């Protein structure tokens, strides 16, 4: 492939790398033994998923804080408003170009293995899983938030009964929580005790470890599998994405169709049936993360980004 054929993927990789290091600047602090606390104000201003140093994230990220606020009886109007505005103006650019979890999945899927696609009907069914997770979480934590305002005694009992879910509602469903908070803590504990016993002390800990290990292995063969089926932040973004001003479009005059080409669909990591989408604007039901691989790979320059 020529440089021209990588005209978007090279800048995207650079942005992903810089974002990853910037968001997780604790890595730099660790490697170079330096203090980068002055970066805090910038990091706090970003709708990020994984900055362990970021107090706004309560440990793991933006979606986590949205749910945490609801559980505390404080509806996050401001954060939700910021998120809606970001998606309206930049669609899911964040997911495709900045999110560290997306970057990790892209690195895993770049291993030279034969990529697979989920059967289309199964894929459509599995896409709903992330919405179910969000609905389930809201179903659990909205009453918690409401009772904090209306019935303090019931709130305390309910919160105790919910345990970890009340403290960190997205925790069990967040790969960023697992990779950037849970896993480092677990490894630290193992080092301290000089054995792997901490992995087996709680059933939930072991299940989480095994589940996300499987997700990471599956991501080698099925690109962006976590984003597509599990990520609660992805579900919120997908629900708003169709209303964004920034979308892809396909020129039906230039496009030669699936039978003669179909490259765009083959390279799409989100398995979007681009040629079945409306040509004026498409988001694949909010799944498109604007990685622009389809646009870059189209031999007829039939796909373009449009604003409006
Ligand atoms: S890669 Fe371009 S020409 Fe080929 S099917 Fe897709 S949009 Fe059409
Ligand atoms: S439709 Fe294009 S830009 Fe969107 S996820 Fe698929 S390849 Fe990336």
Image (tube, helix red, strand yellow):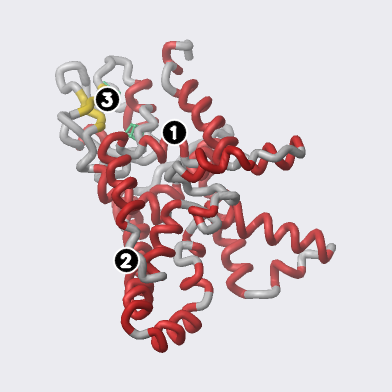
User: Where is residue 292, by image quadrant?
Assistant: top left
Give the residue pinned by disc 3: 305
How far apart, in angstroms, are the residues tagged by discs 1 and 3?
15 Å
Label at residue 83: none
Label 3 SS: strand
Q: Nearer the viewer, residue 130 or 184?
A: 184
How far apart, in angstroms, are the residues tagged by discs 3 and 2?
32 Å
Image height of 159 relative to 85, above or below: below
In the rendered structure, the answer to whether residue 137 lies left or right of residue 199 reads left
In the rendered structure, the answer to whether residue 199 lies left or right of residue 65 reads right
Taking the image in four quarters, ligand 1 sits in the one at: top left
Give the residue pinned by disc 1: 97
In the rendered structure, the answer to whether residue 299 lies left or right of residue 116 reads left
The residue at the point 34 percent across, 51 percent down is 123
Can residue 42 be seen in this snapshot? yes
First in sequence: mark 1 or mark 3? 1
User: Where is residue 89, by image quadrant?
Assistant: top left
Q: Nearer the viewer, residue 27 or 223?
A: 27
Give the residue pinned by disc 2: 135
User: Where is residue 137, by image quadrant?
Assistant: bottom left
Label 1 SS: helix
Image x and y of residue 156, in percent: 45, 84
Image height of 71 relative to 229, above or below: below
């Amino acid at each position: 492939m020529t440089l021209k054929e990588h005209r978007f993927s090279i800048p995207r990789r650079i942005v992903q790398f810089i974002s990853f290091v910037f968001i997780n600047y604790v890595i730099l602090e660790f490697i170079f033994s330096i203090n980068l606390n002055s970066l805090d104000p910038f990091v706090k201003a970003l709708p990020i998923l994984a900055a362990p140093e970021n107090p706004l994230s309560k440990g793991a990220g933006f979606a986590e804080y949205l749910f945490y606020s609801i559980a505390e009886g404080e509806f996050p109007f401001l954060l939700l408003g910021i998120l809606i505005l970001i998606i309206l103006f930049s669609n899911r650019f964040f997911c495709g170009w900045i999110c560290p979890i997306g970057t990790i999945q892209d690195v895993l899927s770049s291993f030279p293995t034969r990529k697979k696609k989920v059967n289309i009907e199964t894929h459509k069914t599995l896409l709903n899983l992330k919405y179910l997770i969000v609905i389930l979480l809201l179903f659990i934590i909205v009453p918690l938030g409401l009772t904090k305002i209306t019935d303090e005694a019931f709130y305390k009992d309910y919160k105790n009964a919910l345990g970890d879910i009340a403290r960190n509602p997205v925790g069990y469903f967040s790969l960023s929580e697992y990779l950037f908070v849970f896993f480092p803590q677990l490894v630290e504990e193992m080092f301290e005790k000089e054995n792997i016993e901490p992995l087996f002390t709680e059933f939930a800990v072991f299940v989480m470890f095994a589940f996300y290990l499987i997700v990471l292995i599956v991501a080698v063969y099925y690109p962006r599998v976590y984003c597509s089926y599990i990520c609660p932040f992805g579900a919120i973004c997908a629900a708003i994405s169709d209303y964004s001003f920034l979308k892809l479009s396909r020129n039906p005059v230039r496009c030669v169709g699936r039978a003669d080409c179909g490259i765009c669909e083959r390279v799409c990591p989100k398995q979007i049936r681009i040629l079945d989408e409306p040509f004026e604007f498409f988001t694949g039901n909010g799944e498109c993360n604007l990685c622009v691989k389809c646009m870059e790979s189209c031999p007829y320059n039939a796909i373009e980004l449009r604003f409006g």
